Image (cartoon, rainbow, N blue to C red):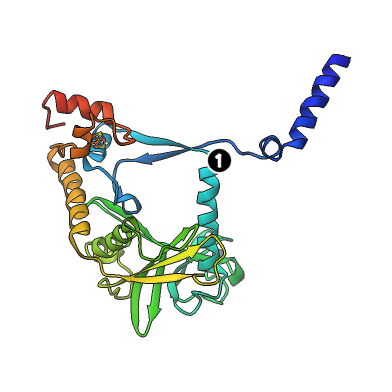
Amino acid sequence: MKFLQTVTKSLSTAIYENPNMLSNYLLDTSDEVQIKKYTHVRLSEINHFCPREYALGYFLGLEKQSVINFAEMRQMELGSALHFWYQNYSKVFRNVLVGYWYCLACEKVRKHFGFKPNTRCEHCGASPKATVYHEYMFRMDNPYRVVGKVDLILYKDGVYRFGELKTLVEAPQEPKPEHIAQISAYAYFYNFVPKDQKLPIEIDTSVVYLCYVPKKFSYRNPLLTFPIKPSGKGIDLLIERVKQFSESVKTRTLPAPLEECIREGFMKRRCYVAKVCKKFYEDGKTQI
Ligand code: SF4
Ligand SMILES: [Zn+2]
């Protein structure tokens, strides 16, 4: 009994002396598993997605499982918290942010499109304090199988445009290619959304806004906004890849493996279906 008490005491002393151990003991810092399906290309991942991986995943009925460790999860949560803050509480976007709104009390989308309503919920009568921004989402099968969720719809000088909020440690001096690709894809693919799922206002897709909010304090660059024109070779290549996946769902013809994967013996990318991809390639199978 005495031995057990000594062990318990020294263990708890160690925990209380180490802030990391105490966090792990006191709080839930376990890994999280994210599951993603291969039915539609998520436009937030368009810059690095592989059409062959999607086609294989789609036809084999697979789900991509990724383990997110606590440090990565914390980083993502910080980004989500900042998004929520800027969409709902900060004055920064108050005069330009429009869209749909959602009542947390009755869990319904408000019957209102535009600036944040300051009236009670039409469905349940809850205070407007329970109303939060509802990001516009589109999903389609034809002509492209894509899904996208737009952070911001911004209204200025009579024009509505899409905006994307990026929270990085420091704001970059110029827009990052993967962010240009993502926001350009929203603008490009929105033009193909069926009319009944489009927004009730006209979006000017010739320009989109990329807003960087640094997580690190900065006097010089507290928030940087870049105008992006969705065009150019980079986006053309990505559209082509989305087209390959969308076509393969109809024809069951597999897109060819990426050059880099062939070169590196299918080991280069962190790919969930690399083994199957390699096998199909080595067997010369192009149909699934
Ligand atoms: S191994 Fe490479 S080419 Fe094959 S599916 Fe994965 S990412 Fe695509
Ligand atoms: Zn309500």
Q: Quadrant of residue 112?
A: bottom left
Horizontal side of residue 227 vs 219, given as left or right: left
What is the x, y in percent for residue 30? 58, 36
Which residue does the image show at 52% across and 49% down from the upper left? 75
Q: Residue 103, image x and y in percent?
A: 54, 64
Q: Amino acid at mark 1?
A: Phe
In what quadrant of the picture does the N terminus appear?
top right
Q: Quadrant of ligand 1?
A: top left
The image quarter containing residue 78 is: bottom right
Helix, strand or loop status at disc 1 = helix
Q: Nearer the viewer, residue 129 or 20?
A: 20
Mark 1: is the Cβ under 8 angstroms from ligand 1?
A: no
Residue 208 in view in this figure = yes
- Residue 188, compared with residue 8, is above or below; it is below
Residue at the limit of the structure toward the bottom, as seen here: 157
Residue 287: x percent and y percent? 12, 32
Q: Residue at x 76, y 30 (%)?
A: 14
Q: Is residue 17 above or below residue 92?
A: above
**Residue that carries the numbered disc 1 in the rendered image:** 70
Residue situated in front as seen by the camera: 149 or 209: 209
Q: Quadrant of residue 96?
A: bottom left
Q: Can the viewer see residue 123 in this picture? A: no
User: Exactly how many numbered labels are in the figure?
Assistant: 1
Classify the position of the C terminus by image quarter. top left
